[in-house]
Image (cartoon, rainbow, N blue to C red):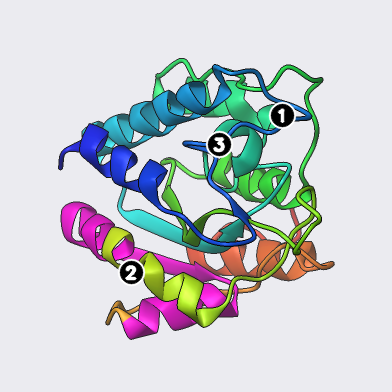
Amino acid sequence: MDVARFVQRLAAADLPDAFNPYREACPVHDSPASAGIRRANMEKYLTAQLRLKPRSLWVGEAGGYRGVRRTGLLLTSEEWLETASARLGVPFEKATVTPVVRELSAGAVWREIERLDEVPLIWAAVPMHTHRPGVPLSNRNPSLKEVRTFYPFLRELLDEFRPAIVLAIGRIAGRALTEVGAAHTYVRHPSMAGIPGFRRGIRQFYGVPIESN
């Protein structure tokens, strides 16, 4: 897998009402160097995962304005960059110039990862930040057309990593995986008060005691 080329293709993707964190700079939270830092973060992430060869792939729906828009990593907020760096053995960098913000879904995801002996490969049906028209710091569900735009990326990751476990985090992710022909297990997305259901689904699947915090 040519990681640099993969990220370059990702940076070239263009959707209306979506922020591409690998090419664009947020006028509120970024510096001119921010997109480059996020590209570097994604390159380091994929390179580390190619070395570690995780058996699990977790696919979310779309990036959020507190997550990938700021870090360049799916379902990973700045609050968890240090943890991700330690677990993957690579120095991820903060790309924004404003204070660290929390993101509930990212927090739910990484709290469950901390219980596992691996860091699953994390991806999304639309690996950029989709927002409401005219409201850049908002989140919205991607359309089916937008999701299908990124099927080549999803297929490439499936072919390269050949994960033994594929989890669809949310119905949009489940449909994407079905359409590319990937067997998977559905888990509730942690957004919209879904954290208890997400936590329960992950712990049931991996055999972690559900009653633990």
Viewer-nearest residue: 135 or 73: 135
Residue 74: % across, % down = 53, 46
Q: Residue at x 77, y 68 (%)?
A: 194
Picture layout, residue 26 above or below residue 99: below
Which residue has dot 3 on it? 24
Q: Could you tell me which secondary element the residue under label 3 belongs to? A: loop
Of residues 70 and 80, the one drawn nearer to the viewer in this rendering: 70
Q: Position of residue 20 (x, y in %)?
A: 53, 45
- Queried whether the magenta region covers residue 135, the answer comes back as no
- Amino acid type, mark 1: Glu
In the rendering, at what x and y percent does residue 26 appear? 68, 33
Label 2 with label 1: CB-CB less than 8 Å:
no
Which residue bears the numbered disc 2?
Answer: 151
N-term-proximal mark, 2 vs 1: 1
Label 1 belongs to which residue? 79
Q: CA distance from mark 1 to mark 3?
A: 22 Å
The residue type indicated by label 2 comes to Tyr
Q: Is 160 situated left or right of 183 in this image? A: left
